[in-house]
């Protein structure tokens, strides 16, 4: 899924922080420390990044590659 732009609960913008979060966690950083460093202190905002599952690539396998013309 695509990361939501804002937190569902408080409305804070979280989408711009997702790439940095993902990059630092892949490098071996502790997710809690990364979230603190990027400024997400509320647990509602933290869950937006922690619970996100990036499945857009799986959906793209089922995307239509050709469109048929209707006559």
Image (spheres, rainbow, N blue to C red):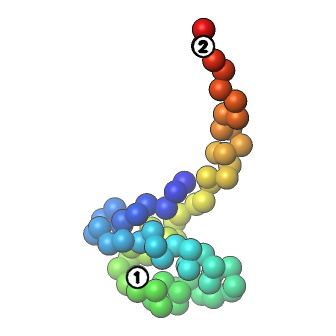
Q: Residue at x 62, y 54 (%)?
A: 55
Q: Is residue 45 above or below residue 32?
A: above
How many C-alpha atoms fall within 10 Å of the one at disc 1: few (<14), some, or many (≥20)? some
Please identify the quarter of the rendering in which residue 66 is found.
top right
Image quarter where the N terminus lies is bottom right
Q: State the image coordinates of residue 42 (x, y, percent, origin top left).
A: 35, 79
For residue 35, above or below residue 70: below
**Towards the viewer: 67 or 43:** 67
Q: In the rendered image of this protein, does residue 66 appear above or below residue 52?
A: above
Res 15 → quadrant? bottom left
Residue 56 in the image, given as x and y percentages of width and height: 61, 52
Image mark for residue 70: 2
Q: CA distance from mark 1 to mark 2?
A: 50 Å
Disc 1 + disc 2, Cβ < 8 Å: no
Task: Point out the tag, 1 or 2, that comes first from the N-terminus.
Answer: 1
Between 68 and 53, the one lying in front of the other is 68
The x and y percentages for residue 22 are: 60, 75
In this rendered view, identify the residue nearer to me: 51 or 65.
65
- Report whether 33 appears left or right of 43: right
Left or right of residue 20: residue 66 = right
Q: Secondary structure at mark 1?
A: loop
Q: Which mark is residue 40?
A: 1
Closer to us: mark 1 or mark 2?
2
Residue at 52% across, 90% down: 33
Left or right relative to 46: residue 29 = right
Q: Quadrant of the C terminus?
A: top right
């Amino acid at each position: 899924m695509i990361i939501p732009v804002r937190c569902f609960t408080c409305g804070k913008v979280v989408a711009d922080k997702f790439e940095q979060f993902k990059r630092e966690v892949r490098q071996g950083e502790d997710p809690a420390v990364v979230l603190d460093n990027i400024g997400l202190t509320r647990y509602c905002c933290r869950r937006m990044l922690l619970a996100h599952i990036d499945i857009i690539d799986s959906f793209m396998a089922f995307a239509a590659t050709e469109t048929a013309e209707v006559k």
